[in-house]
Amino acid sequence: MLTTPIPRLGLDTYSLRSQNWDAFQQLDYCAARGVKVVHFSEPRLVGGFEPDHLKRVRAHADSCGLDIEIGMLSICPTSGIFDAAQGTAEEQLGRAIDAAVICGSPLVRCVLGNTFDRRMPGGIERHIDQVLQVLQRIRSRVVDAGVKIAIENHSGDMQARELKMLVETAGTDFVGVCIDSGNALWAIEDPHLAVETLAPYVLTSHMRDSAVWNTPAGVVGQWTRMGEGNVDIARYIRTYIERCPGRAVSLELIMHRQRTFDYHDDEFWAAYPSTPAREFARFLSRAEMGEPRPDVDSSLAETVGDVDVSLAALKDILSDGSPSGKMV
């Protein structure tokens, strides 16, 4: 039984992206479901960073008793997903910082890139160096604004050990982590290893359940509705609550994706030249505890019903861990 207060329930509204709802509809949905922290992980989800619009969003959130977290995508100029059309990394991050201040968000969630960046010339280290340079150039603006930068372990870009190094090198006074349980698998990591490694730096979270199993073709990973995976997500969340006190537990639902990691292929390891054997062994052991599942139609999108089921399962996990048996 946990003895620490459990954190507020949150939702990354990326989970609702297929509904094409505006920010106000997303806030209303969250308020109706008992969500306390609304995590707009990308500018498009909140409807853009125009100040007057954000002030209206903030006022509506206040009327619903909701907190807001603001996010954006890549701040790495060398990443394949960086959108140079939106300006320099510093310009884009500056707009997100301004948006966070208006919305009362204590942080700006951002990412380096994705797994394909590991295979670019210079490997992931080159991109980490670029992010460090961006953070150094914008440090004073972040500090003056009174917010922090929460860098996510995103889509297989950095392993936990690498993200830890980035945060420590940049400075924990203004940089931390948005930890994503599902993305750990995409970086060939046991999610439990990721939370153990990154807990001291966590500012917020994306909670996503997953299934993983071993096959002759390699390890297969799939994201699932909360409570339907096999990575012991309940224990992961209990560890998170104990080691990241006060941080939001925010569902991010992404489904219908299977990915195979062919660790038998020498070329596969070109993207992971520094991965310790003991870390990969934990990932492989996790996979060996799983059973194969049928593939699904990748064209299907998450429904409101899927989000409802996942929120209910997450509430059950939180209630089971609360000393009072109730969410706080």
Image: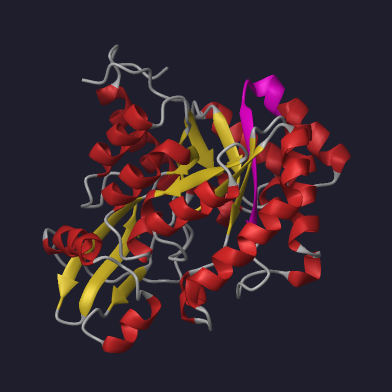
Q: Position of residue 59 (x, y in %)?
A: 77, 26
Residue 25: x and y, percent? 66, 39
Q: Is residue 44 visible?
A: no
Q: How many marks?
A: 0
The colour mode here is secondary structure
Q: Residue at x 62, y 39 (%)?
A: 174
Identify which residue is drawn at 40% across, 45% down.
Answer: 198
Q: Is residue 125 visible?
A: yes
The residue under the point 76% across, 35% down is 145
Farthest residue toward the right?
52
Tell me if 246 is positioned left or right of 277 in this view: right
Against 93, residue 68 (above or below) is: above
Question: Image quadrant for the C terminus?
Answer: top left
Q: Is residue 62 magenta?
A: yes
Camera-nearest residue between 10 and 273: 273
Q: Which corner quadrant of the image does residue 324 belong to?
A: top left
Q: In this orientation, which residue lies closer to the viewer: 294 or 140?
A: 140
Establish if 192 lies above or below 277: above
Above or below: residue 121 compared with residue 108 = below
Placement of 104 over or under 219, stated as above or below: above
Q: Residue furthest top?
A: 324
Quadrant for the N terminus, please: top left
**Of 50 and 246, which appears nearest the observer?**
246
Q: Going 47% across and 75% down the picture, which residue do you hit?
A: 118
Q: Is residue 191 left or right of residue 200?
A: left
Reply yes or no: does residue 321 show up in magenta: no
Residue 216 vs residue 326, the one in the foreground: 216
What segment is highlighted magenta in the picture?
Answer: 61-74
Q: Position of residue 117 (x, y in %)?
A: 52, 75
